[in-house]
């Protein structure tokens, strides 16, 4: 298993554009979470999806949206990009929804977004 | 609101010396705490979690609810321990499973 895979690995956009980031979880994992990591800071929670339903949302504007597909892969969409959206976007998957497993996340390598 | 604080951005020690990475948290409920590690050119990965009460790669961490701390310790640091370490808090309430609140991270450098 290749682990959590994300695409693209790097991308450059200009202000006002839209971006779609993709994530494939580890086989058998039904939960996908998205994090934003700005340079010099820890990852910040954006969304979590489980069985195609949103199960958690962080403190991000409505320009950020996501969805999960029947095969459990996920997309993160960001509209009307701002300079401050430049960051590494991490996807993480986990197997169970159970409370004791909520912290064992498996991370992808991330998609580095630069907004000019 | 929940928060995780790692007061040291950088920590340098020599091989064989003890190391302690500090983590303090604020959370109104019953916390679940974790340490994640990112080695050079590798993915972020779980190192240990407090409910396991186990030692991983010689590291241990004890949850101190009185001091709201979850410091990571190792008695004898090795060069391969050099990495970025993140303390994280699980949202154990509501329906937001899979959400972690991370600290800012501590870069540990172990010199030969």
Image: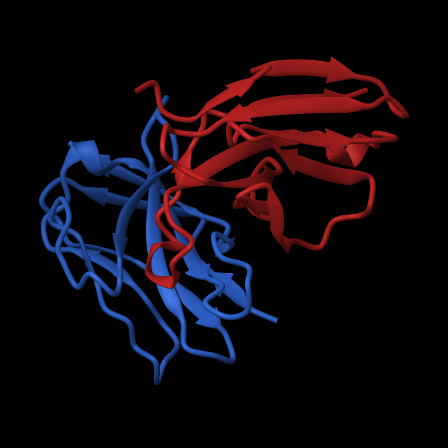
Image: A64 above or below B29: above
Q: Is residue B35 left or right of residue B19?
A: right
Q: Quadrant of residue A40?
A: top right
Residues B99 and A15: in front is B99
Q: Is residue A93 left or right of residue A101?
A: right
Q: In this orientation, does residue A46 appear?
A: no
**Judging from the image, what is the letter of the chain drawn in red?**
A
* Colour representing chain B: blue
The N terminus of chain A lies in quadrant: top left
Q: From this viewpoint, which residue is outermost toward the front?
A: A70
Residue A80: where, in percent of width, then height? 88, 30
Residues A91 and A25: in front is A25
Q: How many marks?
A: 0
Q: Residue at x 40, y 37 (%)?
A: A29
Q: Quadrant of residue A41?
A: top right
Image: A6 above or below A103: above
Residue B83: where, in percent of width, then height? 32, 36
Q: Residue at x 13, y 49 (%)?
A: B17
Residues A77 and B3: in front is A77
Residue A115: where, in percent of width, then height? 77, 23
Image: B44 above or below A49: above
Q: Residue at x 41, y 77 (%)?
A: B30
Image: B40 above or below B76: above
Residues B58 and B10: in front is B58
């Amino acid at each position: 298993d290749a682990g959590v895979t994300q695409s693209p690995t790097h991308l450059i956009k200009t202000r006002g554009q839209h971006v779609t980031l993709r994530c494939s979880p580890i086989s058998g994992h039904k939960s996908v979470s998205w994090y934003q990591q700005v340079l010099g800071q820890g990852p910040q929670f954006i969304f979590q999806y489980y069985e195609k339903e949103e199960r958690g949302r962080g403190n991000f504007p409505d320009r950020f949206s996501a969805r999960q597909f029947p095969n459990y892969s996920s997309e993160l969409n960001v509209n009307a990009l701002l300079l401050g959206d430049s960051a590494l976007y991490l996807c993480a998957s986990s197997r169970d929804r159970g409370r004791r497993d909520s912290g064992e996340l498996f991370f992808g390598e991330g998609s580095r977004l630069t907004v000019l | 609101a929940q928060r995780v604080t790692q007061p040291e951005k950088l920590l340098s020690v020599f091989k064989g010396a003890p190391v302690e990475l500090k983590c303090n948290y604020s959370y109104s409920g019953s916390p679940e705490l974790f340490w994640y590690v990112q080695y050079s050119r590798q993915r972020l990965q779980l190192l240990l979690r407090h409910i396991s009460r186990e030692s991983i790669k010689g590291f241990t961490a004890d949850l101190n609810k009185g001091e709201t701390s979850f410091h990571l310790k190792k008695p004898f640091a090795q060069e391969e321990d050099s990495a970025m370490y993140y303390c994280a808090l699980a949202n154990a309430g509501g329906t937001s499973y899979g959400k972690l609140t991370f600290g800012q991270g501590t870069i540990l450098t172990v010199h030969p």
